[in-house]
Amino acid sequence: MFQRLDIDQYSKKLYSHVRFITLAYVFLTIVDSLVRIFPTSIRYGLRSTQLVYSHPTVFVACCALLVIVLLTVKDCGKHYKVWLVIQLILMCTTLRSKAFATAMAIALVCYFVFYRKKKFSFRTLILFVPLAVALGWEQIEYYFFSSIQFDSARYRLLTASIEIAKEHFPLGSGFGTFASYYSGLYYSPLYMQYGLANVNGLRQGAISFVSDSFWPMVIGQTGFIGAFAFVLALVMLFKAIQKIRKVRLSYYAAALGGMCYLLIASVGESAFVHPLAIPIAMMIGILLSQGEKSTMVR
């Protein structure tokens, strides 16, 4: 789709747009902290930044997208680090665990790519796992190991998805049948069958948590074969991103940042199939296409 697109032609405009939106976010955040004009939730005794969006996680995704665009066109401005830091701080003001983990992952990506000139390997990505777990441990413990785990939609969906994959081996229960939006909208009989109909957020007519995580949907609906195929697709995407490093380090860092965000978000939301993943996927596609056309590192 993007083979004929020359991103350098639009890089200065994109850089200006990112700065403008960042300033708008900062202004609205300050105004909201003083006047409290936007609805939001309270976390750790503080207001979680949501601004004009429907949920703080949407704001996290928007910040992640801006960071990806900023890294892509960073060579157009001398002070991209300032705008990057501001965006990461804005992301963290949502007080969401995925925001903290994503901000830290992007910071490490920039450090290794721009300063250490290191190539990311699977071993490097594995090193991110303990960090992400440490940053999100409070939420992990709350949903999966506390006394509320049996009324936790995330815990129950994950355990049930494994049972479904076993009983519907090898292809799972089929699309739209489990842990996805339409499985809740038309209320799949699997929720009754596996004792999930009385779990908070999974009751018929009150399905707010039915697509609250990504992997149960993949495991349950497509089985072990589908889950393996999706992981394989991610591995192939990671290998494709590795080739961008020889083209331009900014492209490499931006694509890695996008992949890190989607992987982290997939633990606590529908991530890869969420509408907000579309612009991030488009950016990664643009970066891959630019990499195929370029022949020199800048």
Image (tube, rainbow, N blue to C red):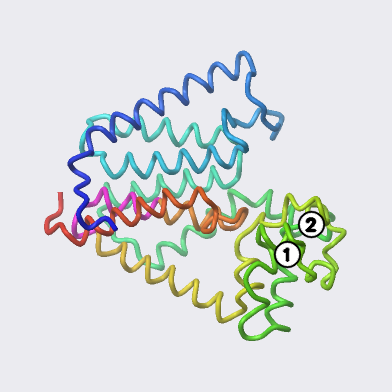
Labelled disc at residue 78 = none
Label 2, secondary structure: give it.
loop
Are the residues tagged 2 and 1 within 8 Å (C-beta)? yes
Q: Which residue is mark 1?
A: 157
Disc 2 to disc 1, C-alpha distance: 9 Å
Label 1, secondary structure: give it.
helix
Classify 10 Å Cα crowding around label 1: few (below 14), some (14-19), many (20 and above).
many
Q: Residue at x 61, y 65 (%)?
A: 215
Classify 10 Å Cα crowding around label 2: few (below 14), some (14-19), many (20 and above).
many
Q: Give 54 or 23, whichever is nearer the viewer.
A: 54
Q: Give 185 or 107, whichever is nearer the viewer.
A: 185
Q: Tell me if residue 16 comes above or below residue 10 in the rendering.
A: above
Q: Which stretch did the figure color magenta? A: 245-257
Q: Residue furthest left?
A: 296
Instruction: Decide if residue 120 is on the left or right side of residue 196.
Output: left
Q: Residue at x 64, y 58 (%)?
A: 213
x and y percent of residue 145 in the render? 76, 59
Q: Is residue 238 magenta?
A: no
Q: On the image, which quarter does residue 31 sit in? A: top right
Q: Tell me if residue 292 comes above or below residue 268 in the rendering.
A: below
Instruction: Decide if residue 172 is on the left or right side of residue 115.
Output: right
Q: Which residue is mark 2?
A: 202
